[in-house]
Image (cartoon, rainbow, N blue to C red):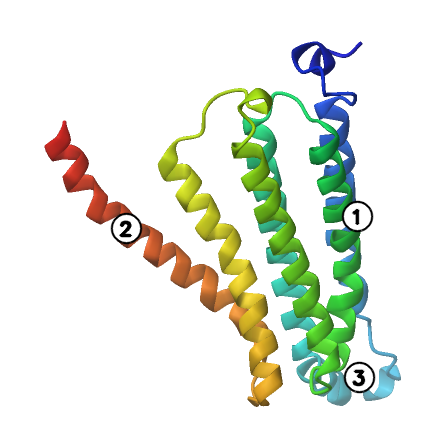
C-alpha cells in the first residue's frame, strides 16, 4: 500500500506517479507545438528574396504558437499549485486529470489548424473550444480540491482561493470572448483575448489586494 493510500482510504494511486504523467504529457504537448512552424521549401538561389517574405506571412502561425505555449505553461503552473495543496488523490482527482490531459494533447492540433487557417472561423473556434474545456476542467478541479479537506495537506487561504478562481476564469473568459467575436464576425485576431484577459485579471487582483491591505491593518 502506498503512503497516499495510507493517508486517505479513497486513494489507490500515488500522487507522485500522477504528477509524473501530467508533467510528461505537458512537456510533449508544448514541444509538439513547434511542429506548426515548418521550414519553408525555397530554392537557395531565391532564399535571400523569398525567405523574409515567407517568414512575414507566418505571423499567424508564430502568434498561435506563442499564445498556446504560454497558455499551456500557465496551465502547468496551475496544475502544480493544485498538487501542492494535495496530500493524496482519489478517483475523482484522477479522472479529472485524465480528461484534462485529453484536451492538453489536443492543443498542438487546435493550434496548428488555427495558425494555418486564421481567416476560416471554424479553425480558431476549435482552438477556443479547446481552451474553454481546459479552463472549465481546471476550475472544476480547483473547486473540488478545496471542498475536500481530507485530500488537503494544509488549508488554503481564503484570499488565495479567490485569486485562483479569478485566474482560472480569465482563460474561460478569453475563450468565450473569442467565440463571441467569431460569432459576430469581428475582423481581428481573437487570439489576442488570451493576452487581454489575463492582464486585466492581474490588474484587478492587484486593485483588490490594495483595497484589502488597509482594512487588514486596521483589524490588526
Q: Is residue 164 left or right of residue 41?
A: left
Q: Quick one: label 2 or label 3, which is nearer the N terminus?
A: 3
Q: Is residue 7 above or below residue 27?
A: above
Q: Nearer the viewer, residue 50 or 145?
A: 145
How far across and how far down the image is residue 148, in percent? 56, 28
Which residue is rendered at x = 58% and y = 20% of the image? 150
Q: Is 33 displayed left or right of 181 in the figure?
A: right
Question: Between residues 176 and 214, which one lies in front from this camera angle?
Answer: 176
Q: Which mark is residue 208?
A: 2
**Up/down of 118 relative to 187, above or below:** above
Pick whichever of labels 3 and 1 is earlier in the sequence. Answer: 1
Q: Secondary structure at mark 1?
A: helix
Q: Quadrant of the N terminus?
A: top right
Which residue position is annotated with label 3? 47
Seen from the viewer's position, the closer of residues 152 and 174 is: 152
Q: Is residue 158 visible?
A: yes
Question: Horizontal and vertical percent for residue 55?
Answer: 71, 80
Q: Nearer the viewer, residue 198 or 212?
A: 212
What residue is rendered at 80% in x and 65% in y? 109
- In terms of sequence position, does the residue under pointer 1 or pointer 2 come before the other? 1
Give the foreground label among 1 and 2. Answer: 2
The residue carrying mark 1 is: 28
Distance between mark 2 and mark 3 Cα atoms: 53 Å
- Tell me the mark number nearer the camera, choosing from 2 and 3: 2
Label 3 vs label 1: CA separation? 32 Å
At horizontal 59% and vertical 90% (from top left) the residue drawn is 185
Amino acid at each position: 500500500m502506498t503512503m497516499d493510500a495510507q493517508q486517505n482510504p479513497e486513494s489507490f494511486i500515488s500522487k507522485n506517479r500522477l504528477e509524473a504523467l501530467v508533467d510528461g504529457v505537458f512537456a510533449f504537448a508544448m514541444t509538439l507545438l513547434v511542429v506548426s512552424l515548418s521550414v519553408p521549401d525555397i530554392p537557395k538561389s531565391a532564399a535571400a528574396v523569398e525567405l523574409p517574405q515567407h517568414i512575414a506571412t507566418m505571423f499567424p502561425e508564430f502568434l498561435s504558437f506563442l499564445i498556446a505555449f504560454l497558455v499551456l505553461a500557465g496551465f502547468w503552473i496551475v496544475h502544480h499549485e493544485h498538487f501542492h495543496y494535495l496530500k493524496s488523490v482519489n478517483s475523482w482527482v484522477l479522472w479529472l486529470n485524465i480528461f484534462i490531459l485529453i484536451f492538453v494533447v489536443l492543443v498542438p492540433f487546435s493550434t496548428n489548424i488555427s495558425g494555418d487557417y486564421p481567416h476560416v472561423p471554424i479553425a480558431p473556434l476549435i482552438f477556443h473550444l479547446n481552451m474553454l474545456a481546459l479552463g472549465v476542467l481546471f476550475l472544476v478541479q480547483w473547486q473540488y480540491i478545496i471542498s475536500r479537506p481530507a485530500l488537503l495537506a494544509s488549508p488554503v487561504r481564503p484570499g488565495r482561493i479567490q485569486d485562483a478562481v479569478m485566474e482560472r476564469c480569465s482563460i474561460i473568459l478569453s475563450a468565450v470572448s473569442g467565440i463571441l467575436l467569431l460569432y459576430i464576425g469581428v475582423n481581428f485576431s481573437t487570439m489576442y483575448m488570451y493576452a487581454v484577459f489575463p492582464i486585466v485579471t492581474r490588474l484587478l487582483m492587484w486593485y483588490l489586494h490594495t483595497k484589502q491591505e488597509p482594512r487588514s491593518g486596521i483589524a490588526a
